[in-house]
Every structure is written in structure tokens, then in C-alpha cells.
């Protein structure tokens, strides 16, 4: 009886945390390993820390920064100071800022191993769950509207028949690079690129992913008018259920490896 109880796996959990205009997602693997992908903007640090106090234990196993923009790294200093992490990964594409320098200083002071998030790296999360880096692009993509965005980490999470694609702030050029190289893009959940902006989520890319569930991390009334209505329409035309953190709050997905269950912290718009 005891052996049977121990054999029951915990679900995989992926939470897209409402951090305003920015990104933050927490993965909790069936083996209990935790990965924080991005940490939202600086202003969201308090709320992010509060979320993690309820949903994770210290230290985190991995903090993965998709790219060095403030709306992705701003809350990380506070979170890493509070929780610590066993490993920190970020992409090699440079983008200096006082916040990034402070983050690196904290990681050094805490003796956290800092590695490059490179294409092809896989991270075993235990219990059949694994995270694979499908990007940043190699060679580096240059000459785009935002090369920092274009060279975002693209990560896919697989657990049996559940899959989540984290598209960072990829640009259209990143998407065509992924398509050209035949990356394994088909995924049941998509963290929509770049807050649902009109600079990514091309028709060809979305058709290759074919998500059942699409999540956009956006701030209410943001200055960028994210998400772009065309992006929302494209996802809905493919049959995806669209969630957005400005309306739904935290979007939490659980899976036993087959079924996906979504709960939101706000009942904004019944789907
Ligand atoms: Zn962003």
C-alpha cells in the first residue's frame, strides 16, 4: 500500500504569474524541481516573491532568463535574494543595464553557478519531465527591430504527452529560423512570444505549434497595446483557448502527462 502511494506521481505544474507588463513563469516538475523562467519587471518583485512563497520552496532549482530586458529580469534580484537558486542560465546576447549588473553581483555573492543558455541544452527535471532549449539562435540573428528579443531563449517543456513552448520575446525572424531548422515546435501550450505583439506570432509559426492553450503575459492598459488583436485572432482561428494575465490573473496549468487543466486566479472572461 505504501509503495503504491509513493508511486503516484505529482502533476506537472506551469504557472504564468501575473507580473504586469513582463513575463514570469514557474515550472514545478512531477519530481518537485522548480524552474523560474523570467522574473517580470522590477515593480512586480514583491508580488512575485509572494507567489513563490506559496508555491515553491527555497532554493529554486533553476532560474532561466530568456533575454536581458527589464520586463523579464527586473524582479529576479529580489527573488534570488529571498530564495536562492541552484543554477542560473541566460543567453549570451549582451544587453547591459544597472539591473543586470546588480543581478550578476548578487549571483556571484551567493556563489550561484552562472552558465550560458545555449541552443541544444537539455535539463532533466525528474519524473520524465525535461526542458530543452530550442534557441537562442545560432548564429546570432542581427539587424532586426530588437536583436535582444530576436536572440531570446526558446524553451520547450515535455512531460509524457504534455508540452509547453516558451517563446520568450522572439521576433518573426526567430520564428522563421526555428521553422527552417525543423525545430520541434508542436506543443499543446504556447507562451505567446513578446506579450502577443504584432512583431511575432506569424501564421506559419503558429500553425507549426498548433497550441490548444495560448498564454499571453501582459500588463493591463500597457503602453505597447499588447497583445495585438491580430495575434489573438490568429490563435483563436487555430482553435486555441487564449488566456491573458491582465484579465485572467495568474494562469496555472496542471497535467498528469495527458490531460491539461487550467485554473486562473481571476474569473475575468469565462471561456
Ligand atoms: Zn518582454
Image (cartoon, rainbow, N blue to C red):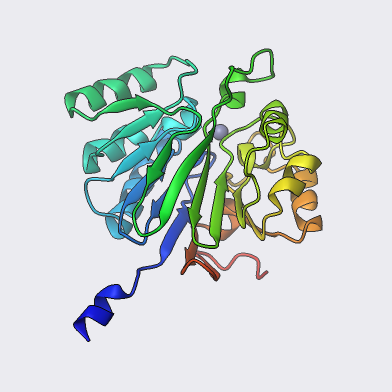
Determine if residue 39 is in view.
no
Q: Quadrant of the C terminus?
A: bottom right
Q: Could you say which quadrant of the image residue 36 lies in?
A: top left
Does the rendering let one see residue 46? Answer: yes
Q: In this view, does 113 lie above or below 2?
A: above
Q: Position of residue 119 (x, y in %)?
A: 50, 29
Q: How many marks?
A: 0
Residue found at x 57% / y 60%? 248
Query: Residue at the location (43% across, 29% down)?
Result: 117
| Left or right: 199 as drawn, with respect to 51 | right
Q: Position of residue 216 (x, y in %)?
A: 61, 48
Q: Is residue 25 left or right of residue 181?
A: left
Of 94 and 134, the residue lying toward us? 134
Q: Quadrant of ligand 1?
A: top right
Quadrant assignment, res 225: top right
- Which residue is pictured at 52% across the width and 32% down the height? 153
120 to the left or right of 3: right
Work out which quarter of the rendered image holds the N terminus and state it.
bottom left
Amino acid at each position: 500500500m505504501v509503495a503504491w502511494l509513493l508511486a503516484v506521481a505529482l502533476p506537472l505544474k506551469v504557472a504564468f504569474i501575473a507580473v504586469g507588463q513582463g513575463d514570469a513563469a514557474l515550472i514545478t516538475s512531477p519530481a518537485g524541481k522548480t524552474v523560474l523562467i523570467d522574473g517580470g519587471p522590477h515593480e512586480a518583485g514583491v508580488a512575485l516573491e509572494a507567489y513563490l512563497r506559496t508555491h515553491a520552496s527555497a532554493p529554486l532549482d533553476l532560474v532561466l532568463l530568456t533575454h536581458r530586458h527589464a520586463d523579464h529580469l527586473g524582479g529576479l534580484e529580489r527573488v534570488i535574494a529571498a530564495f536562492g537558486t541552484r543554477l542560473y542560465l541566460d543567453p549570451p546576447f549582451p544587453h547591459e543595464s544597472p539591473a543586470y549588473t546588480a543581478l550578476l553581483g548578487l549571483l556571484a555573492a551567493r556563489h550561484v553557478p552562472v552558465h550560458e543558455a545555449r541552443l541544444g541544452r537539455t535539463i532533466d527535471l525528474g519524473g520524465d519531465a525535461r526542458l530543452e532549449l530550442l534557441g537562442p539562435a545560432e548564429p546570432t540573428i542581427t539587424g532586426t527591430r530588437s536583436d535582444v528579443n530576436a536572440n531570446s531563449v526558446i524553451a520547450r517543456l515535455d512531460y509524457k504527452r504534455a508540452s509547453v513552448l516558451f517563446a520568450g520575446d522572439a521576433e518573426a525572424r526567430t520564428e522563421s529560423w526555428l521553422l527552417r531548422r525543423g525545430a520541434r515546435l508542436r506543443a499543446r501550450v504556447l507562451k505567446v512570444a513578446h506579450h502577443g505583439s504584432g512583431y511575432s506570432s506569424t501564421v506559419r509559426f503558429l500553425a507549426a505549434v498548433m497550441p490548444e492553450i495560448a498564454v499571453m503575459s501582459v500588463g493591463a492598459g500597457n503602453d505597447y497595446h499588447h497583445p495585438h488583436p491580430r495575434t489573438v485572432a490568429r490563435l483563436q482561428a487555430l482553435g486555441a483557448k487564449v488566456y491573458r494575465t491582465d484579465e485572467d490573473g495568474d494562469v496555472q496549468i496542471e497535467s498528469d502527462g495527458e490531460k491539461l487543466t487550467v485554473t486562473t486566479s481571476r474569473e475575468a472572461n469565462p471561456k
